[in-house]
Amino acid sequence: MPREKNVMIKHGNPLSEHKMNSVLKLPFFVRAALFLIGLYVMISMLYLAQNILVPLIYALIVAILISPIVNFLVSKGLNRAIAISIVLLITFLVAGGLIVLLYSQASLFHSTWPKLIEKLQGLLNQLIAWASGYFNISAQKINRWVTETSNDLVKDRNTAIGNALTTMGGILAATVLAPVYIFMILYYEPHLLAFAHRVFGASNDNKVSEILSETKAVIRRYIVGLFGEFVIIAILNSIGLLALGIEYAVLLGVIGAVLNVIPIIGGVMCIALFVVMALLTKSAIYIVYVVGLYALIQFIDNHYIFPKIVGSKVKLNILISLIAVILGDALWGIPGMFLAIPLTAIVKLILDRISYLQPWGFLLGAPASTDGDYEGTSPVKDFIDYLISKIKRKK
């Protein structure tokens, strides 16, 4: 009898093993329901923790950017805390200089705001007169509709102000917390890297090292490339608007460069801003000039700047980029829109390193040319290329 008991312990009970396997093999609808519940819980946690996660992610990106400089100073014998403090001081001085430049331009814009409002009111009156004559609607009805719409906007003003104050409070909190986060991440960088290796085990050391090094490289190249694109686009916008005689050209050029970071949505906002300012400060014909200027700058950006400087670093297709930006805005607002692209690039990098998830990494990726290089293709770029080829054939 003891011998039979030992045998059963050694070989196990076939019936219990069968039951265990049958329990583990859940039907598809059960697995799908569990996946959706888990996804909902994860998104809810990300949304609720945005005040903590957003500053932390921005701090992590900045820390990855400046960590090579810190490590270089440490290798020269400088204390790690002192090296981090020096690099952070220089970083925030540069950022502060850019903020002062933007503030000086914005103050000039604020001083002439009443004149712009007066000009806008005159344009609105002209538009009402034209609509009244063209659509055969009395001007009184149009004015009544405008008044009712204005009253509705005034009613929602308190809510808008409250949301704006909440957003500003979050930005101020992030501004205060970011330097602390950056300092701590850089100071404990060796400890955090050792933790990552221990979590995934010694057998995965090589793969973990590869993913970490490539993640840092992707973030550095993407942010540096994005900053380079921002500077070039800001200069092109400012020069073009100055040549057209548009007021506040430098401020508009910098704002347009910032909006250019957001795929498609930012471009629509940018051209709308340029058109409105051209209409307020110049005549209607300047709308055509501004649209032509924007189209030229976008042609240069889509063909030469973005593919060479930014696109080759992340290799995401336009559809995924747009979806990521929309989801980032829905989840974390404007900060989420700017974080969407680098975070999606990191997800793609991880998916490419896991064999059974590589098809999903391929889905996120951009089409490659015949030689395997990234082309930076987009519908706008393909349409412009088609027009250029037609023009060349006619010639």
Image (tube, rainbow, N blue to C red):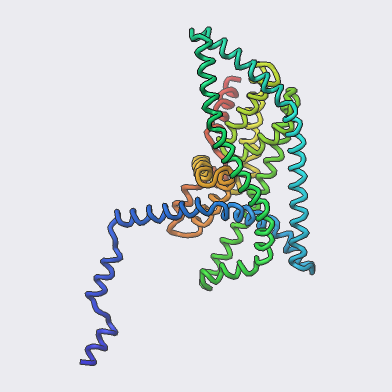
- From the top left corner, tell me how far across and down residue 74 is, in percent: 75, 66
Can you say whether 4 is above or below 365 in the image?
A: below
Position of the C terminus, as image quadrant, is top right
> Is residue 21 rendered to the left or right of residue 148?
left
Residue at 61% in and 28% down: 271
- From the top left corner, tell me how far across and down residue 7 is, in percent: 25, 87
Which of these two is toward me, 86 or 117?
A: 117
Residue at 62% in and 52% down: 58
Can you say whether 215 is above or below 386 in the image?
A: below
Which of these two is toward me, 11 or 248?
A: 248
Q: What is the quadrant of residue 209 in the picture?
A: bottom right
- From the top left corner, tell me how far across and down residue 185 is, in percent: 65, 62
Which of these two is toward me, 67 or 373?
A: 67
Residue 330 visible? The answer is yes
Position of the N terminus, as image quadrant, is bottom left
- From the top left corner, tell me how far across and down residue 239 is, in percent: 74, 30
Which of these two is toward me, 100 or 67?
A: 100
In the displayed image of the protein, which residue is found farthest to the left?
1
Residue at 26% in and 66% down: 22
Q: How many dots with numbers?
A: 0
Residue 370 visible? The answer is no
